[in-house]
Amino acid sequence: MDEEWFQEQVDEAVAGLPSEFADRLDNVDVVVESEPSRRVLRKMGLKGRRTLLGLYEGVPQTRRTHAYGAVLPDRIVIYRRPVLAAAAARRRPGQGFDEAVRQVVRGTVLHEIGHHFGLSEEDMEKYED
Protein backbone atom coordinates (compact mmCIF):
# COMPACT_ATOMS: atom_id res chain seq x y z
CA MET A 1 0.00 0.00 0.00
CA ASP A 2 1.44 3.34 -1.09
CA GLU A 3 2.38 5.61 1.84
CA GLU A 4 1.20 8.73 0.02
CA TRP A 5 -2.23 7.19 -0.68
CA PHE A 6 -2.51 6.16 2.97
CA GLN A 7 -1.67 9.71 4.13
CA GLU A 8 -4.39 11.02 1.79
CA GLN A 9 -6.91 8.71 3.47
CA VAL A 10 -5.96 10.07 6.89
CA ASP A 11 -6.17 13.65 5.62
CA GLU A 12 -9.60 12.95 4.10
CA ALA A 13 -10.84 11.42 7.35
CA VAL A 14 -9.81 14.56 9.24
CA ALA A 15 -11.23 16.87 6.55
CA GLY A 16 -14.50 14.91 6.60
CA LEU A 17 -15.15 15.47 10.29
CA PRO A 18 -18.51 17.01 11.11
CA SER A 19 -18.09 20.76 11.63
CA GLU A 20 -19.09 20.56 15.31
CA PHE A 21 -15.88 18.56 15.88
CA ALA A 22 -13.60 20.03 13.21
CA ASP A 23 -14.28 23.57 14.42
CA ARG A 24 -13.30 22.57 17.97
CA LEU A 25 -10.05 20.77 17.17
CA ASP A 26 -7.45 22.83 18.94
CA ASN A 27 -3.68 22.50 18.78
CA VAL A 28 -3.60 18.98 17.27
CA ASP A 29 -1.32 17.44 14.64
CA VAL A 30 -2.40 14.23 12.95
CA VAL A 31 0.54 12.21 11.68
CA VAL A 32 1.17 8.79 10.14
CA GLU A 33 3.86 6.43 11.33
CA SER A 34 4.63 2.94 10.10
CA GLU A 35 3.96 1.13 13.38
CA PRO A 36 4.15 1.72 17.12
CA SER A 37 7.53 1.27 18.77
CA ARG A 38 8.10 -1.37 21.42
CA ARG A 39 8.37 1.45 23.95
CA VAL A 40 4.93 2.76 23.00
CA LEU A 41 3.43 -0.73 23.15
CA ARG A 42 4.94 -1.30 26.62
CA LYS A 43 3.73 2.11 27.78
CA MET A 44 0.22 1.19 26.65
CA GLY A 45 0.44 -2.19 28.39
CA LEU A 46 0.20 -4.20 25.17
CA LYS A 47 2.01 -7.53 24.98
CA GLY A 48 2.38 -10.33 22.51
CA ARG A 49 0.69 -9.77 19.18
CA ARG A 50 -1.53 -6.92 20.36
CA THR A 51 -0.87 -3.58 18.72
CA LEU A 52 -2.27 -0.09 18.23
CA LEU A 53 -4.04 1.40 15.24
CA GLY A 54 -3.65 4.91 16.60
CA LEU A 55 -2.55 6.90 19.62
CA TYR A 56 -3.53 10.25 21.13
CA GLU A 57 -0.76 12.08 22.98
CA GLY A 58 -1.59 15.33 24.67
CA VAL A 59 -3.87 17.16 27.05
CA PRO A 60 -7.55 16.43 26.41
CA GLN A 61 -9.72 19.51 26.14
CA THR A 62 -11.60 18.49 29.29
CA ARG A 63 -8.36 18.76 31.31
CA ARG A 64 -7.17 22.08 29.95
CA THR A 65 -7.26 24.99 32.32
CA HIS A 66 -6.85 28.72 31.84
CA ALA A 67 -3.09 28.12 32.19
CA TYR A 68 -3.01 25.96 29.05
CA GLY A 69 -1.02 27.72 26.38
CA ALA A 70 2.31 28.01 24.61
CA VAL A 71 2.59 24.23 24.40
CA LEU A 72 3.51 21.91 21.58
CA PRO A 73 0.54 20.55 19.66
CA ASP A 74 -1.15 17.37 20.80
CA ARG A 75 -0.44 14.46 18.46
CA ILE A 76 -2.67 11.86 16.97
CA VAL A 77 -0.62 9.10 15.41
CA ILE A 78 -2.18 6.71 12.92
CA TYR A 79 -0.12 3.54 12.50
CA ARG A 80 -0.15 2.44 8.86
CA ARG A 81 0.90 -1.21 9.09
CA PRO A 82 -1.54 -2.18 11.87
CA VAL A 83 -4.35 -0.31 10.09
CA LEU A 84 -3.62 -2.19 6.87
CA ALA A 85 -3.60 -5.51 8.75
CA ALA A 86 -6.88 -4.64 10.46
CA ALA A 87 -8.44 -3.67 7.13
CA ALA A 88 -7.41 -7.01 5.62
CA ALA A 89 -8.86 -8.89 8.60
CA ARG A 90 -12.13 -6.89 8.71
CA ARG A 91 -12.75 -6.77 4.98
CA ARG A 92 -16.26 -7.94 4.08
CA PRO A 93 -17.00 -10.18 1.10
CA GLY A 94 -17.27 -8.07 -2.03
CA GLN A 95 -15.63 -5.07 -0.39
CA GLY A 96 -12.52 -3.68 -2.01
CA PHE A 97 -9.38 -3.44 0.08
CA ASP A 98 -9.16 0.34 -0.44
CA GLU A 99 -12.63 0.80 1.02
CA ALA A 100 -11.79 -1.42 3.98
CA VAL A 101 -8.70 0.72 4.63
CA ARG A 102 -10.79 3.91 4.44
CA GLN A 103 -13.22 2.53 7.02
CA VAL A 104 -10.49 1.52 9.46
CA VAL A 105 -8.67 4.84 8.99
CA ARG A 106 -11.87 6.83 9.59
CA GLY A 107 -12.77 4.79 12.66
CA THR A 108 -9.27 5.16 14.07
CA VAL A 109 -9.14 8.91 13.44
CA LEU A 110 -12.54 9.38 15.09
CA HIS A 111 -11.50 7.24 18.05
CA GLU A 112 -8.32 9.23 18.68
CA ILE A 113 -10.11 12.56 18.22
CA GLY A 114 -12.56 11.32 20.85
CA HIS A 115 -9.62 11.16 23.26
CA HIS A 116 -8.72 14.76 22.35
CA PHE A 117 -12.22 15.74 23.44
CA GLY A 118 -11.81 13.86 26.72
CA LEU A 119 -13.69 10.65 26.00
CA SER A 120 -12.42 7.52 27.72
CA GLU A 121 -12.11 4.08 26.15
CA GLU A 122 -15.34 3.13 27.93
CA ASP A 123 -17.17 6.22 26.60
CA MET A 124 -16.08 5.43 23.05
CA GLU A 125 -17.11 1.78 23.31
CA LYS A 126 -20.66 3.01 23.94
CA TYR A 127 -20.54 5.17 20.79
CA GLU A 128 -18.86 2.52 18.67
CA ASP A 129 -21.43 -0.11 19.62
Image: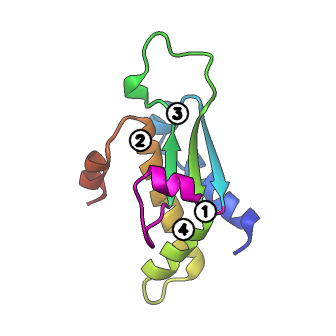
Q: CA separation, marks 1 and 3?
A: 24 Å
Q: Residues within 10 Å of mark 4 (few under 14, many from 20)?
A: many
- Would residue 68 appear left or right of 35 to someone viewing this image? left
**Residue pointed to by mark 4:** 83
Q: Where 22 falls versus 64 (above or below)?
A: below
Of mark 3 and mark 4, the one earlier in the sequence is 3
SS for dot 4: helix
The reply to whether discs 4 and 2 touch (Cβ–Cβ < 8 Å) is no
Q: How is the image coloured?
A: rainbow
**Residue pointed to by mark 1:** 35
Using the rendered view, name the quadrant where residue 90 is placed. bottom left
Of mark 2 and mark 1, the one earlier in the sequence is 1
Q: Quadrant of the N terminus?
A: bottom right
Q: Residues within 10 Å of mark 2 (few under 14, many from 20)?
A: many
Looking at the rendered structure, the kind of residue marked 1 is Glu
Q: Residues within 10 Å of mark 1 (few under 14, many from 20)?
A: some
Q: Where 121 falls versus 48 (above or below)?
A: above
